[in-house]
Structures are given as C-alpha cells and as structure tokens.
Image: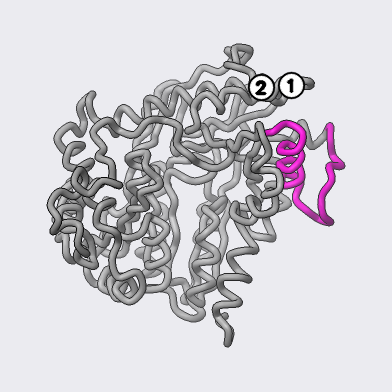
Amino acid sequence: MKVSDPWSWSYRGVYSACGSGRHAQECSSHLGAPGVAALGKEGWSLTHPVFAPDSHHGQTAAGSKAEWDRSQPLGYPPLTKILASFFGKLLGQELDPLKNVLVTVGAYGALFTAFQALVDEGDEVIIIEPAFDCYEPMTLMAGGRPVFVSLRPCPAPKGQLEYSNDWQLDPTELASKFTPRTKALVLNTPNNPLGKVFSKMELELVADLCQQHDVLCISDEVYQWLVYDGHQHISIASLPGMWERTLTIGSAGKSFSATGWKVGWVMGPDNIMKHLRTVHQNSVFHCPTQGQAAVAQCFEREQQHFGQPSSYFLQLPKAMQLNRDHMIRSLQSVGLKPLIPQGSYFLIADISDFKRKMPDLPGVEDEPYDRCFAKWMIKNKGLVAIPVSIFFSQPHQKDFDHYIRFCFVKGEKAWCVSCRMRPHSRPWMRGCRSGKESYIPETPQSRPTQ
C-alpha cells in the first residue's frame, strides 16, 4: 500500500529495513578495521578480460568524439544491436534492437524499471526465496504485495555435502500462490544466494503456471555464464509460450567481471517493453555512453569466439570453479558445511554445529542466529559473511537462521577461511595449505539431477 509520503516510506522505511545493505550498515563499525576480509559480498580480484577496453578512456572505449555525446535513450546503438544479435540466437528469437532491448544502469536498474512499469497498486508478485534482497522493496515501492514461496532443502545422504540443486520448490505450494491478483513472478537462476541452477523440469513447472494464470515472468539471469560441473543455464524465455510474457535481465558487470561499469539490459516482447521504455525515458533517460561502448566491444569479441576454448564465457566459469572448490575445502576444514553451488559466485555454509556449541551469542532480542554469528565472526575472526536469513521474508527467517553466505570470487582471500577460524591463528597468513582434500566435485553423470 502506498502512503501520502512515498519518499519517507519507500526509501527510508522499506529499503533500509531489509537485505544485505542493512547488514552492512549494522556492521559498518567493524568493516573498516585492519585485517577484516569481506568475503560475503562480491568484489572482483580477478583481472578483467584482456580484450575489455578501459571504459574510463573514451578514445579506447567509444572512439570518435561523436560517441562521447549523449547516446540514444534506449541504449548505445552498437550495444543494443550486438545484444539483439547475440541473445536472439540463444533465445530463438529475431530481436529488434529498438523494440526488444533496453540498456539500463546495471541489472539493478533493469529490475527497478520493470517493477515500476508493470506492478500496480495491489498487484501480487510471487518471489521465490531465498531471494536477492531488492525484489521485496521494489515490489512494495511500486505498490505491489510480495507473495513468498520457499525453496526447501532435501537432506543429503549422511556424510555427503548438500548441493544447491537439492533445494526444491513444492509444486503444490507454488501453485497455491497464484491468485487473480498475481501480476508477476520473479525468477533468479542461477540463484543468489544459493547458487542453484533451475533445471528444465523446474522451469517448465514455473512456465506452465505463468501461462495458466496469465502472469508475467521477470527473469533475473545475471549469473548465466557462471555455471559449473557440466550444468546448463536455460533461459525461461526460450521455453514454448514464454517469450511473450518474460523479461530477461542481464548484467555486463557479472558477464565481464566489471561490476563498476554498471551496464545492464532487459529484453522482452515489444508490448511489454514499451512500458519499461516509458519509465526509463522519464527517469534516468539514458546511460553513460562510454561504459556501453566498452560492453559492446566485449560482446563483439565474444560473439566471434563463442563456444570455442578462447571464449571468455567458457574461461570465466573454469576459473571460478577452482575458487569454489578451494573455498569448499577451506570451510570444511573448520567445521562448516558448505552447500556446493552449481552456479553464481556465492555459496552458503551450514553453521548448525556452531549454533549448538555457541547458542548464546550477543544480539538484540529475537535476532536470527546467523546475524549474531556473522557479527561475532567479524569481531573475533576478522571475516565478513552475509547471514542468509536476510534473503528470506520475515515469517521464514527463523527457519533459515543457520546459514551464512560467502563469495568465492575474491581469489586467495577466499582460501584462507581456515587460517582465520582456527583459535589463535594469525589474521593474514600467507596461503592456506591446511584444507582437507575431502571434497571431489561430482559431475551430472555421477549424481542424478532433478
């Protein structure tokens, strides 16, 4: 419900009350301390693609002076053209750069534009949780009502680690969330924070329900190139009958390891995109040209190498999988139980054993345990992780308060968890060679998938 003073409600009341942003604010007094390693949120330590131009230098990224000037509001033409060509082949559609593609200020901008354009007062938006923490406030800011449905873990066999894909939707529960007021469903695959890659069967379940109830699908696919162990990312818009009702959102920051460029995009049918164009033209109007030009060059090069060993979209997940496996061993060595992600650059770890051993950590009344543990870990071990309960709606937070999220994109820092978590350990030990070699990633052929 909107109120008479939307600024005080939407921006101060809703956003500040939820998500990893709030956790960072609450822990801000510790985050700048010497020796604190922020392993909860992303921040690239890998080098960017060698072919990526420097977006800060117009002569490299955008060429002539004309391209320093304001671009077309819907996107820098070379970028919208290459996005339409590149993703049109993947989605099985002939995309018009002017009608089916919109360039935004990051994927965050694409999400905000979509919610503002499509969600009206009283509309219901189904959000699959754990969910990226902007979906709920963006729904509320548009006047909608978030409706949550949880992925639930299926216990792994004794002595084995869980996989992110072991977290499943209950088809009956999901179907029960659709009502005559449902306007949209938000899908995030690969999922943040789980790293779950939705299977074709799961996507078909979502697609069938969206078509049955005439519901839009907002598909956040920013981690689509970060998929491991032979799994495949499938865009729900590529399924029969879904292009007509799906917005597909992507990110140059995640695709090319350049989150500071803040270039995102959204693709969809013209009859839906026209509403996003209206919001975009009457808010940010257009995005900086130089960043768009840099991304266009990256995609032009990638299109030439796509599917070959020289493809950055093949090289990136290989590097990230090595980081993932190092972090898994490091977490295991200190008694944490990581869930093996099939996608993204996040993983969550089960802290149930710590909860049993240290049940009474300092915290405010009724504060979920994972938040208390995260603050304890910052103060006592110099490690920053994100409590997973913040990715759940209020009624479900206590049910999922025994997980914390790590980011494994940070290279060697991510491999030293065991150094910091051991009693009396030095905070900046060089290299961690004590991780147990007990984890061997399984392939889809050696482990059944849903």
Q: Is residue 72 above or below residue 330?
A: below
Residue stretch rendered in magenta on the structure: 357-382
- Residue 437 in picture, x, y percent from top left: 58, 12
Q: Which residue is mark 2?
A: 418
From the viewer's side, name the closer residue of 208 and 435.
435
What residue appears at the point 55 percent right and 77 percent down from the top-left corner? Answer: 7
Can I make out residue 163 in this image? yes
Q: Amino acid at mark 2?
A: Ser
Q: Which residue is mark 1?
A: 422
As helix, strand or loop, the secondary structure at mark 2 comes to helix
Residue at 71% x, 41% y: name it. Answer: 374
| Marks 1 and 2 in Cβ contact (< 8 Å) | yes
Q: Judge by depth and name the residue closer to the eye, 92 or 319.
A: 319
> Dot 1: what SS?
loop
Query: In the image, what residue occupies the spot 53% across and 36% down?
Result: 407
**What colour scheme was applied to this rendering of the protein?**
one colour
Q: In the rendered structure, does residue 8 fall within the stretch colored magenta? A: no
Residue 240 coordinates in the image, percent (x, y) = 26, 54
